[in-house]
Amino acid sequence: MLSTAYAMVPFTVDFLKKHVGERFVPLVVMVDFPLSSEQAIVDAVRAALDKYGHRGVMAVFSHIASVPPVILPVERLAALCREKGNINVVIDGAHALGQIPFDLSDLADKGVDFYVANAHKWLYGPKGTAIFFVRRSKHDTVRPTVISSDYKDDFQGSFEYTGTRDYTAFCALDACLDFRKRFGDAEIMAYLKKLADEGGQLLAKNWQTELAAPPEMSAAMATVRLPVSEWAVAERLQRDLFERYQTYVVCFATPLPLRFVTIPREDVIVFASDGRELPPDVDPTEGSKRMFWMRLSAQIYLELSDFQLLGDRVLELLREYAKEMDAATEADARRVSDTVRIGA
């Protein structure tokens, strides 16, 4: 997996490691930001597979990462896994469905074995709605977690009824698809892509910073580096934007750390973004410059002026924080001066 994997992926690896034991060895390829192109990711994964592909059992890649929200070259990565070993490829498409077009049959031809995605994000569906694609040749390897009273011994039949759950959310998907059809599926995606690109570039210019990746690696989300040098400031910005202006954004730091809960560093194979395998006692984030970013989501009810307003509010808050710091420094200076006079 890549260091950009959503937290539930390393957490699941933790679970598997605990129950499978020493035979299960996780491998992580680090991704550094800002990115100049997708080629660096492909090259680093190729280096890892050249050495360990023959031992690989499963590879998990995000189609669009959560943070930073970059489109990853899953077709090329899946093809590499097929070329280098008998590796099952799982794609986490949580942010892809409704944000970018993709063809599951085409992905399967490239080497994708499993694809999971939810409909409650960019497809505008209710929570709890999702898709689960399994390559036909893998159907016999997958069964639901609940064996119900209506169980059938085939892939689709085994999933048709999984107990007394509420199926209302699934029934609502027709309305979601009708809504998208009304405005045009391609038109929605094109509008969001254009708005995210223009909004991200606007903020990078106004903040005199940069984007996390080139426009061709993003869709409806942009990631802009914040003009701050401390995580506490980025964290405060996220909180103040929500509490004062009811504006929710995601702030995060790079380099992204390994996020295992119980697996020690020495039990993880790690490849740096340049394709070097790192010694087991080396922290993969060591020596990297720490940067702080803001993830921004475009949507059909937003326009470019909303991004401008957000950018202005961030700068206003930063000026406010600076004044507070200056006032605190001045107060500290007065206290020191008073102490000196008293001592004299």
Image (cartoon, rainbow, N blue to C red):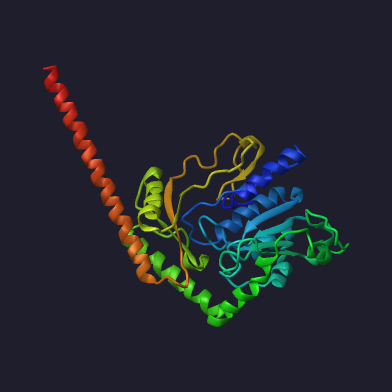
- Number of labels in the image equals 0
**Could you tell whether 306 is left or right of 11 in the image?**
left
Front in this rendered view, residue 222 or 84 = 222
Q: From this view, report whether residue 9 is shown above or below residue 22.
A: below
Q: Residue at x 67, y 47 (%)?
A: 12
Q: Residue at x 52, y 65 (%)?
A: 217
- Residue 86 falls in which quadrant of the image? bottom right
Image x and y of residue 159, in percent: 79, 62
- Residue 169 falls in which quadrant of the image? bottom right
**Could you tell whether 25 is left or right of 140 in the image?**
left
**Could you tell whether 222 is left or right of 165 in the image?**
left
Q: From this view, report whether residue 196 is shown above or below residue 27.
A: below
Image x and y of residue 198, in percent: 40, 70
**Quarter of the picture holding the C terminus:** top left
Residue 133 visible in the shown view = yes
Q: From this view, report whether residue 173 is shown above or below residue 271.
A: below
Residue 25 visible in the shown view = no
Q: Residue at x 60, y 56 (%)?
A: 43
Q: From this view, report whether residue 109 is shown above or below residue 311.
A: below
Q: Residue at x 64, y 61 (%)?
A: 128
Give the residue at the far right of this rendering.
Answer: 153
Image x and y of residue 300, in percent: 47, 73
Give the residue at the far top of this rendering.
Answer: 344
Image x and y of residue 240, in percent: 37, 51
Front in this rendered view, residue 143 or 193 = 143
